[in-house]
Amino acid sequence: MTSSLTELDDDLVRCMSIGAVFSEFGGKIHSIDFHRKDDLLVTASEDDSVRLYDIANAKLLKTTSHKKHGTDRICFTHHPSSVICSSKYNLESTGESLRYLSMYDNRCIRYFKGHTQRVVSLCMSPINDSFMSGSLDHSVRIWDLRVNACQGILRLRGRPAVAYDQQGLVFAVAMEGGAIKLFDSRSYDKGPFDTFLVGGDTAEVCDIKFSNDGKSMLLTTTNNNIYILDAYGGEKRCGFSLEASPGTPIEATFTPDGKYMVAGSGGGTMHAWSIETKNE
């Protein structure tokens, strides 16, 4: 974001309220992503559209339709008008599981073929043109925006979730049984250099994120639990449970300073917790 960050404390978090409402679409949104540097938000919706918003001015900038492939997971590239979007339709027949899209001129720059089932996790490297995708075909694929061919494949059990740390040097892969494996992004072919286990919860992880300072990892699971782990040793720092959201995984994230965690819930409410005190 271009504006300076306000230091958060408990009182400020308690006073937070809705700052803007985007009412152009009233249906289900599959995924959202904020640009790392610009005040932009992108969404992928159930009507097979992608929408780009200016969040500083609460303005819809562009809507593009993608009826042939559909829209599911989405993330920004480094360019503010380019995104990566996963497909919903014709995966087995076309193999076109991922698309590199220009929102500026509504053009598909490149198709990425390989996954044969739905992509459920997608993330862009913060330092270069690499990105990762995790699919229900039990694979994680590593790509480069500049070439069509897949650069690497990790085979695993269960539903994968993937994330780069904020320096782009390490990436995490969550898999069946609550196992979190850490890889050096420069030599991932040598296997993980560390493995964590989320003890006591064998539900599949549907999302994983690193805090901006790289000290913590956030996991959300398919049974609506959220865990904060120490990113260095894997110890569980805290855990929270939310109301069920049938058919839709819950979404949670760190605040920019890494001191708080914010999440939506099946009850239609937002929750915020202090990671240090574990209080809501």
Image (cartoon, rainbow, N blue to C red):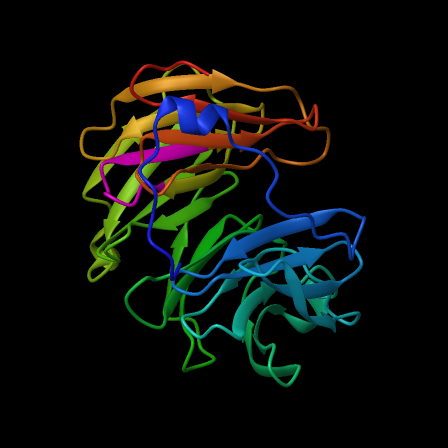
- The structure residue drawn at horizontal position 77% and vertical position 54%, both measured from the top left corner, is 46
Relative to 173, residue 2 above or below: below
Is residue 175 rendered to the left or right of residue 116? left
- Quadrant where the N terminus lies? bottom left
Q: Which residues are magenta?
A: 210-219
Q: Front-most of 170 and 11? A: 11
Magenta-colored stretch includes residue 135: no
Q: Position of residue 134 (x, y in %)?
A: 49, 52
State whether residue 203 appears in this view. Answer: yes
Q: Position of residue 130 (x, y in %)?
A: 36, 68
Residue at 72%, 68% in the rendered image: 69
The image quarter in which residue 216 lies: top left
Closer to the camera in the image, 225 or 253? 253
Quadrant of residue 222 within the rendered picture:
top right
Image side of residue 116 versus residue 239, left or right: right
- Image position of 119 (left or right of 130): right
